[in-house]
Image (cartoon, rainbow, N blue to C red):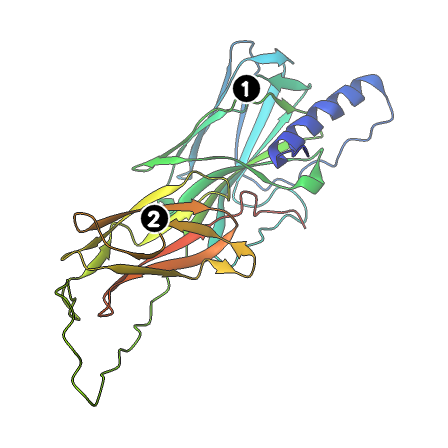
Amino acid sequence: MAVRYSPLAVILATSALLLAACESSGNVHPPPTPTQPPGLTANATVGSAGTSALLAGGGTTTTAFSFPGATAGVGSTLTLTAGTQAPVAGASIRRAPQSIKSILEYVTVESNAAVTFTGTPALTFVLPAADVNAMGTYTLELYNSTAPGTGFVTLSTGTLNGSTLTFPAGTTPFSIPVAPAFVVFALALTVPGPSPTPTATPTSTPTGSPTPSASPSATPTPGTNIVSANTPYLTFAGATAAPQPVTISEQNGAALTETDTCTTGSVTIVAVTPGGTTTPAQNTISVTVTPEAVGTCAFTYKDAAGNSATVGVTVSNPAPIVIQ
């Protein structure tokens, strides 16, 4: 069985290896100092039980860090600098075509000694009104200058409550190298694109001899027996994210047929279950949508009269931001 390593595991492991190499050899050349634009700055002393830092003022985003306990570098000083421009020369955002991704804030963290924490920090952001988007997905990204080829990797997805955005602490050991090496935390916002508009398939009218009457059944009429979905759009933070449920309703229980644009060749973006033609139970269908690959698509449930409900889907790249 092949062993797969996540980008986050690689970047954290690389940090630890470089720290060990710096201690054992005088020939290691640290990466260049970040080019950090003017912004909010804070200092914090590393403690064995935890370390807190607050960047606030100037009417910008307020950012609170809560690092877990440290196993190395206790007593050293962290310098945190926040800004809205990339602090790494040549850094840029590569936007996936299925989404609009923007960086709301970068926070560069440097240390006067190598530090290792028991996990990644918990963060709380208080956003200005212009950055609050209830329809968007907020993610926390991490860049380590000791592994520039890895670029930014996604640490976690945030929870928005009003203007307060929170990210949980992680449990994977996390290292900050000694300056001039550095790490960067970036707050990213992804807004899904509009869901595609389905095109109704015209129905033909038979001519000639009268058609024999069929057995009684639920026969939908255009404009009635309306088909609806409990959500117009789904977003997944990567192809390994948990499946999501959708409820499809049809007022008179007429049979519905599912079609989608989620499979192209051998690539399936999401699996929609049940597929094909289904008769609703209690006038509803419980649908399970399972992500399988990065991309954007849509699925539609339609009755025989052309009444339909369409749900758009975006499966985001867990690490769409790269260093060029």
- Residue 282's tag is none
User: Which quadrant is the N terminus positioned in?
Assistant: top right
What residue is rendered at 36% in x and 54% in y? 275
Which label sits in the foreground, 2 or 1? 2
- Residue 135's tag is 2
Residue 156, image x, y percentages: 48, 34
- Residue 134 or 305: which is nearer the viewer? 305
Dot placed on the residue nearer the N-terminal end, 2 or 1 = 1
| Amino acid found under the numbered disc labelled 1 | Ala
Q: Residues within 10 Å of mark 1 (few under 14, many from 20)?
A: some
Which residue matches tag 1?
A: 44
**Residue 3, image quadrant:** top right
- Residue 83 or 29: which is nearer the viewer? 29
What residue is rendered at 49% in x and 58% in y? 263
Q: Residues within 10 Å of mark 2 (few under 14, many from 20)?
A: few
Answer whether residue 194 is visible to the viewer in this image.
no
Residue 77, image x, y percentages: 61, 18
* Secondary structure found at label 1: strand
Q: Residue furthest bottom?
A: 208
320 relative to 215 in the view: left or right: right
What residue is rendered at 63% in x and 18% in y? 116
| Amino acid found under the numbered disc labelled 2 | Met
Residue 233, image x, y percentages: 34, 52
Answer whether residue 255 is visible to the viewer in this image.
yes
44 relative to 176 in the view: left or right: left
Disc 2 to disc 1, how far (Cα)?
34 Å
**Residue 226, image quadrant:** bottom left
Residue 197, image x, y percentages: 34, 67
Is 172 above or below relative to 154? above
Q: Residue furthest top?
A: 48
